[in-house]
Amino acid sequence: MNWQNDDRRKFIISSVQSVGLVATGGALLGGYVTKAKSSPLVLRPPAAINEEDFLTACVKCGLCAEACKNRDSNIDRSSGKHKEATLKIATAGDERLIGTPYFLPLEIPCFMCPDIPCVPVCPSGALDIKSVLNKKKELDINQAKMGLAVVDRESCIAYWGIQCDACYRACPLLDKAITLEYQKNERTGKHAYLLPIVHSDACTGCGLCEQACVTEKPAIFVLPLDIAKGKVGSHYVKGWDAKDQNRVKDAQILESKTGINKESALDYLNSKDEF
């Protein structure tokens, strides 16, 4: 009968549409996950392991963000309510893997809590507590490496000769992570530049400097370490330094088998003759 054929036709069309929707949804989800995973400009909580391993280890429990929200300094004393926390949990559309923690320094930087409440609560090892322990095996937020502050010298007004030390004063590691370098202004001969210099060995990537920057778009900003720092490569050898001096201080000079004694060799090396 015709009604049976119509029902069959509707069933087939409905099935095809369902398969199409599932395939489209899967493709969109797959595209989102790929995009989220490939986004390199993500700042994670203190003690986060490298990004690739972090995405695997993080179980998206949100405990770190909850601990950040409930820290004492995040409670409004007048109302007793929680203010917005540093750590956010990624949702659809954030271009970060859903459920993973991150922070945006320009909005809310890391306030460098001494007890680092977000780290000990992590159940999976995505936040490695050992990386934020000092020599006394105590929690030390100054050991954190969330990222590295980078100065855009073209837009930093201090490099224009305008006196500004906003980032320097905002830095919790004063005169360690950011120092001010005095430089004479040769153009006027009467003024000086006070230039902010970031030291990668001390900078934690908290972002307090980025939030404090006075320019319309911050001239100092925090980037993940893999983005902010270069890599020398194993084929380059660093010049002689104090460690090298200590390493060879007791070494003995061996006589050369070429017939050139060490005195003549030293004279040769120290010769001022030009070639």
Image: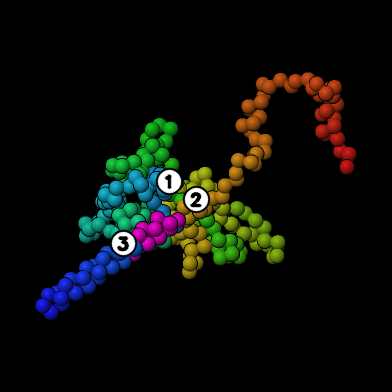
In the picture, measured across the screen, residue 151 lies left or right of residue 5, that is right
Please state the extent of the stretch shown in magenta in the rendering: 28-40
**What residue do we see at 46% from left, 59% from top?**
210
Q: How many marks?
A: 3
Kindly indicate the quadrant of the structure image that contains residue 131: top left
Badge 1 vs badge 2, beta-carbon distance below 8 Å: yes
Residue 92 visible, this orientation: no
Q: Which residue is mark 3?
A: 26
* Foreground pick, 33 / 250: 33
Q: Residue at x 31, y 66 (%)?
A: 24
Is 255 left or right of 206, judged from the image as shown?
Answer: right
Q: CA distance from mark 3 to mark 2?
A: 31 Å
Q: Which mark is residue 100?
A: none
Q: Is residue 60 left or right of residue 43?
A: left
Principal secondary structure, stretch drawn in magenta: helix
Residue 32 falls within the magenta-colored stretch: yes
Q: Quadrant of the N terminus?
A: bottom left
The Cα atoms of the two marked residues, 1 and 2, are separated by 9 Å
Callout 3 crowding tier (Cα within 10 Å): few <14, some 14–19, many ≥20: few
Secondary structure under tag 1 reads loop
Q: Is residue 55 above or below residue 234?
A: below
Q: Is residue 47 above or below residue 20?
A: above
Residue underneath mark 1: 50
Q: Find residue 185 and report its horizontal and vertical position in percent.
A: 67, 61
Which residue is disc 2 drawn over? 226
Q: Nearer the viewer, mark 3 or mark 2?
A: 3
**Given this view, does label 3 or label 1 mark the residue nearer the observer?**
3
Q: Residues within 10 Å of mark 2 (few under 14, many from 20)?
A: some
Residue drawn at point x = 66 percent, y = 26 percent: 248
Disc 2 residue type (three-letter): Asp
